[in-house]
Image (cartoon, helix red, strand yellow):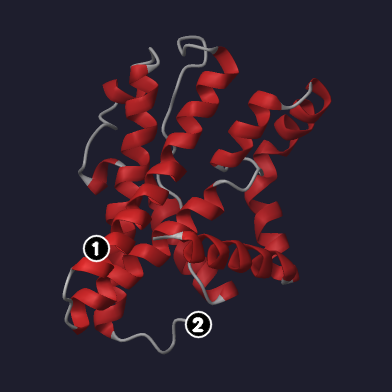
Amino acid sequence: MLGNLTLTSVIIIIIVILISMTIHEVMHAYVGLKLGDDTAAEQGRISLNPLSHIDPFMTVLLPIITIVLFGAPILAAKPVPFNPDRVKFDEFGGALIALAGPLSNLVLAVIGAVAAKFIFAGAFVGEFISAFITINVALFVFNLIPIPPLDGSRVLYAFAPDPIRRVMEQLEPIGLFIIFGLILLGGFGGIISNLNDMVLRLLP
């Protein structure tokens, strides 16, 4: 999948991921603060400096491993902490914090789609905008998958009955391995790709 990329394309992808990931994490922290929990803010997570959100394993080593195994990068930023006892609206507040990240990526994708219609772009800018839209849609879709520790699991947890909550709590330590396993089976990646295409078609 990555074998045909030029150096310019790789640089564009890295820049877009850093921008998109940073805004995603900032929005988690910002919404947490607005809902009464300053845990993330005190740890410097309301920052547009990407270094504040990079995790050595999840952001650096994991994409290298998944490129080797799957031919495509899977990565995550340093988790944004929050104290559920300090968040307004209990589990629903937690769900709002979780939703803030993926929704920020959807908004960025919409902004990119609008920009693509009104900006006369050369080859570099055109490639950048295209990557910006595609990567943000992918982050939106992937993070809403309801498997721990992805954001979608926190949203599901807020509305799920107790038996499902207990199952999700048990899955938390092995959630990433479940995701890898589903990707290896093949069909999971196809579902994500179809969802990405659906969202892309809905953009202005």
Q: Which of marks 1 and 2 is in front?
A: 1
Q: What secondary structure is marked by label 2?
A: loop
Q: In this view, does 108 lie above or below 26?
A: below
Q: Measured along the vertical axis of the image, is residue 7 above or below residue 32? A: below
Residue drawn at point x = 31 percent, y = 76 percent: 10
Q: Can residue 27 be seen in this view?
A: yes
Residue nearest the observer in this picture, 154 or 2: 154
* Kind of residue at disc 1: Ala
**Front residue (pair 24, 66):** 24
Q: Position of residue 97 (x, y in %)?
A: 46, 28
Q: In which quarter of the image is the C terminus?
A: bottom left
Cβ atoms at labels 1 and 2 below 8 Å apart: no
Rendered residue at 34%/70% (across/down): 131
Depicted 68 relative to depicted 164: above or below: below
Going by the picture, which residue comes out furthest to the right?
163
| Residue bearing mark 1 | 115
Camera-side residue of 35 and 121:
121
Q: What is the crowding at mark 1: few (fewer than 14 residues within 10 Å), some, or many (at least 20)?
A: few
| Residue drawn at point x = 24 percent, y = 63 percent | 115
- Quadrant in which residue 52 is drawn: top left
* Circle 2 crowding by C-alpha within 10 Å: few under 14, some 14–19, many from 20: few
Residue linked to disc 2: 1
